[in-house]
Amino acid sequence: MRLSQGHLNLLATCPRKYQHTFIDQLGSPTTPEQQEKQAWGSRFHLLMQQRELGLPIESIIQEDAQLQRWVTGLVGVAPDILTPNPNSEAFRDSEHCRTLAFGDYLLTVIYDLLIADIKSAQILDWKTYPKPQKRQNLAQNWQTRLYLYVLAETSDYAPEQISMTYWFVQSQPEAKSLKFTYNAGLHEQTRRDLSRLLHQLTDWLRRYEKGEEFPLVEEPAGTCDFCQYAVRCNMVPEPRRDIAPQRWRDRTAETGESETNKDLMLNLASIQEVSL
């Protein structure tokens, strides 16, 4: 069963929401605004991949002023990273995929850009929503933790040689970045937390096969107010549905939760492997 950082974040946030999303496949329609943001994000990632491959992108960005600002702005603040030295022997790969077997699961990551040389390895991730998350929240996010963990487990680099940097391309007046370093202590903590979470998932899947639903979030603390399944789970009174969509859109715009496009193929693959 394949799992991505999107699966892990949802499992940690609310197991019942994971069930509805990935096992029951109960999707909710996206608004035109959400669809447009997802399309912009996908186009930006594709352009950055084309640029890394040395393919021409000038004719494409000239037709789209916003994309042109994003790309040129990012390259302008990080020229040493995004304009490689032709004499450098560093390994560079865009949309780099790695898979790690962990117990009964396959953990899969896709790095927007991986740069590695004899001394260190850098993971770069493009975020196309304007407001950076709090550093502490990103540090605990399973994207950060899983991306660093998988690279350490699937390479010869020590945890201390690995880092991950988020680039927020829409930040004003210029793109901003948040860099996370790694160490052996964080690596061991992630291993323990993964073991615990996946052990719980195995137990929930067994119970689900017998007709028992995944558990609800233990401490809602307002989380259910933004969830499209709140009414289904009896966590929010019925009349509140009319205000939930806008609040959900606002929260999505702030946290970037709409950026799950690259997980979609993994999600579909994982659903097929669940025995019901």
Image (cartoon, helix red, strand yellow):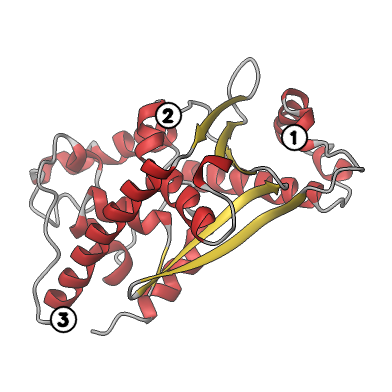
Q: In which quarter of the image is the N terminus?
A: bottom left
Residue 68 position within the rendered picture, expressed as x and y whole percent measured from the top left: 77, 33
Q: Which residue is drawn at 56% across and 39% down?
A: 163
Asked where in the image residue 67 lies, by quadrant, the reply is top right
Q: Where is residue 208 in the image (x, y as percent from the top left)?
A: 15, 75
Mark 1 falls on what kind of element? helix
Q: Can residue 158 be seen in this view?
A: yes
Rendering coords of residue 18 (x, y %): 27, 60
Name which of mark 2 and mark 3 comes first in the sequence: 2
Which residue is label 2 attached to? 133
Disc 3 marks a residue whose amino acid type is: Glu
Q: Which residue is drawn at 54% across and 54% down?
A: 151
| Residue of label 1 | 81
Disc 2 packing (10 Å; few <14; some 14–19; many ≥20) = some
Q: Mark 3 points at which residue?
A: 209
Q: Earlier in the sequence, mark 1 or mark 2?
A: 1
